[in-house]
Amino acid sequence: MEIKVLQDILSANDRIAERNRHLLDEKGVFALNLMASPGAGKTSLLLETIKRLKNRVSIAVIEADIASSLDADKISKEGVTTLQINTGGACHVDANMLNNALESISLEDTDLLILENVGNLVCPAEFTLGVDRNVMISSIPEGDDKPYKYPLMFSVANAVLVNKIDLLPYLEFDFRNFSRGVGVVNPKAALMQISCKTGDGMNEWISWLLAEMKK
Amino acid sequence: MEIKVLQDILSANDRIAERNRHLLDEKGVFALNLMASPGAGKTSLLLETIKRLKNRVSIAVIEADIASSLDADKISKEGVTTLQINTGGACHVDANMLNNALESISLEDTDLLILENVGNLVCPAEFTLGVDRNVMISSIPEGDDKPYKYPLMFSVANAVLVNKIDLLPYLEFDFRNFSRGVGVVNPKAALMQISCKTGDGMNEWISWLLAEMKK
């Protein structure tokens, strides 16, 4: 019974995701869903990405948080359109929340739309949104075992960014173990090492993103 | 309609949590629910706690993961009873999962039962389990804004441990901002700074735990 309800919710979600996909395609918007654990560096990556791209592409950001508008405040200082969604306790963004948010964004004027999902390595991966790419961040302090413990999140990601590599001198992190884990669940994912603090790897990330936008 | 279903699930959960509470009380087991983001240090805290207490109290551990038995393998090496639950995708442990797990543990021989919940700062906080204390770990790399962004988790915690303080020289973390946030949602929570790596703060944590067990 409960499983039936869940299936109904998920298939309703997929139908709305399809609508989102059509709408974004129609308006020529490349949309990216950014997912990670709390504190892995989603907002930092957003800020670094905006700094590097805002003079070349028109960017809009949707910030999803359970509570507060701390991240949206930081992003809007960069001068890009920023919409805050408070999920009111919900642990993820679903297609309907995104659909509502899209109504408040001037899609004609947007090249790149980035959704910062709720900080959560589990639930956001379960909901198709109708975006072009899923990008996830894993960070050095979280440890190299995450692909084994949260396989669904890693399996839906088109790119996996390993952030905070500036902390490698102070922490144990076995890249071979990590990338083996990613390879098992998602051999096609692009895997990049970055530090939003030092800027390491940002060129590779920006190049990847621009190449994907052209596809 | 969907909300109604969720309410039904939660009230069914509460009834089973009540059963767990009675069972644990009857058997004289002090039960602790350990929650945190992925990689904040739940397993490390467990290992350090077991090392310091296993000769004084009889400990059993329930490891909940979406997939894998990596943590249970580490814990069982310490020679304590360890039960692995794989939630099969679920983002939290609910009262029924705990109830099933309790059937497989020799409660008469257990003083302290520690449940390591799924790594998630959102959903586990929504499910009452019937345990004696909720303990959550936040870690320095996650940043000092987490109490503002994940208020429910902080509000249900009897103790908030800030782990990885050994990384303070390399990261910005404003303890005043953090503890102000905890104070807003949960002024009664015990707040401790620890490093599972260096052992800093472990005496305070162990003292707190032993004192709570005597209450």
Image (cartoon, coloured by chain):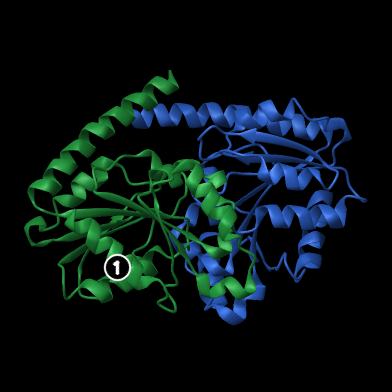
Chain colours: A green, B blue
In this view, B30 is above or below A35:
above
Residue B203 in percent (x, y) is at 81, 66
Where is residue B93, by image quadrant? Answer: top right
Where disc 1 sits, the SS reads helix
Name of the residue lying farthest toward the right: B55
On the picture, is A141 further left or further right than B211?
A: left
Residue B135 seen: yes
On the picture, is A137 further left or further right than A30?
A: right
On the picture, is A119 further left or further right than B17?
A: left
Residue A47 seen: no
Residue A165 in percent (x, y) is at 51, 70
Q: Residue at x 82, y 56 (%)?
A: B211
Task: Pick whichever, A183 or A118, lies toward us.
Answer: A183
Residue A182 in percent (x, y) is at 49, 48
Name of the residue lying farthest toward the bottom: B169
In this view, A166 is above or below A162:
below
Q: Residue at x 70, y 29 (%)?
A: B101
Check the picture and name the quadrant holding the N terminus of chain A: top left
| Residue type at the position of mark 1 | Ile
Q: Residue at x 39, y 45 (%)?
A: A124
> What residue does disc 1 label?
A206
Where is residue B66, by image quadrant? Answer: top right
